[in-house]
Image (tube, rainbow, N blue to C red):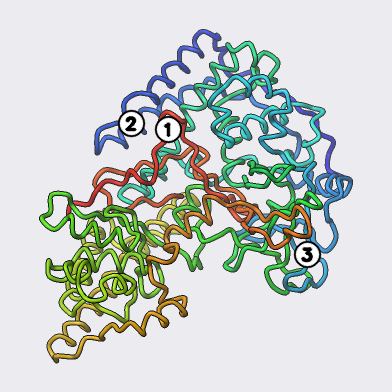
């Protein structure tokens, strides 16, 4: 068993006393600063510096005031395992162990076969929005619209209340959580600077701003709202406390079904969230019949090997922003690119109509992938329409087999024309080249910086992310150039254009890679739904065992405090684990209802 722990509030004797009025004035100033009008384009960094200065002033005055535990987290792993066994969780076949750069994870203590059910966690161990509503936080939850609208924030405050409660049943879990994290919320100012000009920077700045705003708001609520009078947080609710809770939830939260299976709720799942990430498939679901979270092995594991799970198809920007790590072997890395048909263009109506028939908006956020080809079928279809001449547009609207030809827009085997292919790949090559020029450093300079032995972990993470963005764009430039030259050769040699025939529709419908865009969920939306909806597998009874299966994507609320705002003038904004802990991660937006934006608000491109 771990050391016996006494929950306590530490107060530093060297810190000057701060009057409640002085602190409340600082909190009010912070809330006002974070709630004002959005900064004008180019002023976001200046606003961040101002907010950060206020936060640091508050942190300095709060130094030494926090709930702490004696010892370190590893001292309590045995207590966690004992509690899990008492609750009916699986505790055989693995143990918590340290793995070099990956931190803590699960290690097999016997051979485990692929798809073997080796881990299950019953509902009574989970911290959920539902358990928060039934806790000391319940009265405030019933009155506060922010808590009601934002399950992530509810979980964060629930976690803080239980941490401050010496008799909480969740203490064996809470005591094993990291004392701090590697998400950008913990970056120093100079470390954040490495992300300037990257597509991740806007989400990073918004995440910090929203965290500061929420902290200031709930500080005032905790100290003034009648329904908050019984919360054990008045003497220990520092910015560091809230940041810790936010990061804990952001790197761990999952969506599971409620007990009756009627809807989903957010949850923290002890022990399971110790698993680290690797490429693969989702292997976790929720069994409603036995009312427990279940995980099967991703592959065969030998005794003493680390047991991994797959967090989902997340980009490295998402991993860094929401989980605090960069995954070097990320097969799903990508950067976003915002494109749109200008409404002032003469052919706008025709292009918008062809796109609508293909199920593609005239303005949207697409992705450039780290793989080859770098563009999806959806983006290929958009670019083809984007580059069409009036004659080509008319052919796809009212020409022979116009309806069926729409099916071919996303299929690389059926070019609109050689000229169209040349134009679209030229456009992609040019656009990626322009995006590369927005960075303040070159790829070579980034690689040189990464060779410095004294580089901080956070700086290393930021520079790796910056370099990864550039490498994806560089591959897009190279691919665009190669494709452009190929199609130029086809045109110069008078090669016959592959002709579409009605019989080809069977080919398009029967091969997944060639499915007509209009008949399927576009892969960009598939990825978004998979990561953001993230419903868990439900098994209410035998008749519905095969019913819908979605994953528990642990950790990464889409920013426990992030926004979806896009940086002015930018083409793409990535959406955004603490080393050693993670499940299949669950992105979810966490903006206050009054400030939340949707994906549909992407500004139109000006090309």
Residue 47 screen position, x and y as percent: 33, 31
Residue 339 screen position, x and y as percent: 26, 56
Q: Residue lying farthest left? A: 346
- Residue at x 56%, y 60% (from the top left corner): 312
User: Neighbour class for label 2 at 10 Å: few (<14), some, many (≥20)?
Assistant: some
Q: Nearer the viewer, residue 573 or 131?
A: 131
The residue mark sitting in front, 3 or 1, is 3
Residue 558 visible somewhere in the drawing: yes
Residue 33 screen position, x and y as percent: 38, 23
In the picture, the disc for residue 47 is: 2
Disc 1 target residue: 209
User: Neighbour class for label 1 at 10 Å: few (<14), some, many (≥20)?
Assistant: many
Instruction: Please give left or right for residue 72 compared with residue 500 in the image.
Output: right
Residue 323 visible somewhere in the drawing: no
Look at the numbered disc 2 and give the secondary structure of its residue.
helix
Residue 140 screen position, x and y as percent: 63, 20
- Residue at x 12%, y 66% (from the top left corner): 390
In the picture, the disc for residue 117 is: 3
Earlier-in-chain disc, 3 versus 2: 2
The residue mark sitting in front, 3 or 2, is 3
């Amino acid at each position: 068993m771990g050391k016996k722990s006494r929950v306590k509030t530490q107060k530093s004797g060297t810190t000057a006393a701060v009057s409640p009025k002085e602190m409340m004035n600082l909190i009010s100033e912070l809330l006002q600063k974070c709630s004002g009008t959005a900064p004008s384009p180019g002023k976001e960094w200046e606003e961040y510096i101002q907010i950060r200065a206020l936060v640091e002033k508050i942190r300095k005055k709060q130094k030494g005031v926090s709930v702490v535990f004696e010892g370190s987290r590893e001292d309590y792993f045995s207590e966690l395992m004992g509690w899990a066994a008492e609750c009916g969780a699986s505790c055989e076949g693995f143990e918590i162990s340290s793995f070099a750069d990956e931190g803590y994870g699960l290690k097999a203590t016997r051979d485990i076969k692929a798809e073997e059910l080796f881990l299950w966690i019953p509902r009574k161990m989970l911290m959920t929005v539902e358990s928060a509503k039934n806790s000391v936080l319940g009265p405030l939850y019933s009155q506060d619209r922010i808590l009601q609208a934002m399950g992530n924030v509810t979980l964060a405050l629930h976690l803080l209340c239980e941490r401050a409660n010496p008799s909480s049943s969740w203490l064996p879990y809470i005591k094993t959580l990291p004392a701090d994290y590697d998400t950008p919320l913990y970056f120093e100012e100079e470390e954040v600077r490495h992300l300037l000009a990257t597509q991740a920077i806007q989400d990073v700045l918004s995440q910090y701003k929203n965290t500061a705003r929420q902290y200031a708001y709930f500080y005032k609520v905790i100290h003034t709202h009648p329904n908050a009078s019984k919360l054990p947080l008045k003497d220990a609710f520092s910015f560091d406390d809230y940041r810790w809770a936010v990061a804990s939830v952001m790197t761990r939260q999952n969506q599971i079904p409620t007990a009756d299976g009627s809807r989903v709720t957010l949850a923290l799942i002890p022990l399971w969230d110790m698993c680290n990430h690797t490429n693969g498939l989702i292997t976790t679901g929720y069994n409603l019949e036995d009312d427990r979270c279940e995980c099967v092995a991703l592959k065969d594991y030998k005794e003493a090997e680390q047991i991994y799970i797959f967090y989902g198809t997340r980009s490295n920007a998402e991993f860094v922003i929401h989980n605090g790590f960069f995954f070097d072997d990320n097969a799903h890395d990508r950067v976003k690119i915002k494109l749109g048909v200008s409404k002032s263009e003469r052919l706008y109506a025709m292009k918008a109509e062809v796109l609508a028939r293909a199920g593609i908006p005239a303005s949207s956020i697409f992705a450039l992938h780290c793989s080859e080809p770098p563009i999806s079928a959806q983006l290929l279809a958009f670019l083809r329409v984007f580059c069409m001449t009036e004659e080509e547009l008319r052919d796809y609207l009212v020409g022979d087999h116009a309806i069926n030809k729409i099916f071919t827009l996303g299929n690389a085997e059926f070019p609109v024309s050689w000229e169209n292919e040349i134009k679209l790949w030229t456009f992609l090559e040019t656009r990626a080249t322009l995006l590369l020029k927005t960075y303040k450093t070159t790829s070579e300079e980034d690689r040189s910086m990464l060779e410095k032995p004294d580089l901080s972990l956070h700086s290393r993470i930021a520079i790796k992310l910056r370099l990864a963005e550039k490498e994806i764009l560089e591959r897009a430039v190279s691919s665009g150039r190669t494709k452009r030259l190929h199609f130029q050769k086809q045109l110069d040699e008078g090669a016959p254009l592959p002709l579409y025939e009605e019989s080809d529709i069977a080919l398009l419908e029967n091969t997944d890679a060639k499915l007509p865009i209009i008949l399927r969920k576009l892969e960009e939306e598939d990825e978004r739904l998979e990561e953001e909806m993230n419903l868990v597998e439900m098994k209410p009874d035998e008749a519905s065992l095969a019913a819908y299966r979605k994953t528990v994507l642990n950790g990464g609320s889409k920013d426990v405090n992030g926004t979806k705002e896009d940086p002015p003038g930018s083409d793409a904004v990535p959406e955004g684990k603490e080393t050693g802990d993670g499940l299949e991660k669950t992105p979810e937006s966490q903006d206050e209802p009054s400030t939340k934006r949707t994906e549909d608000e992407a500004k139109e491109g000006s090309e």
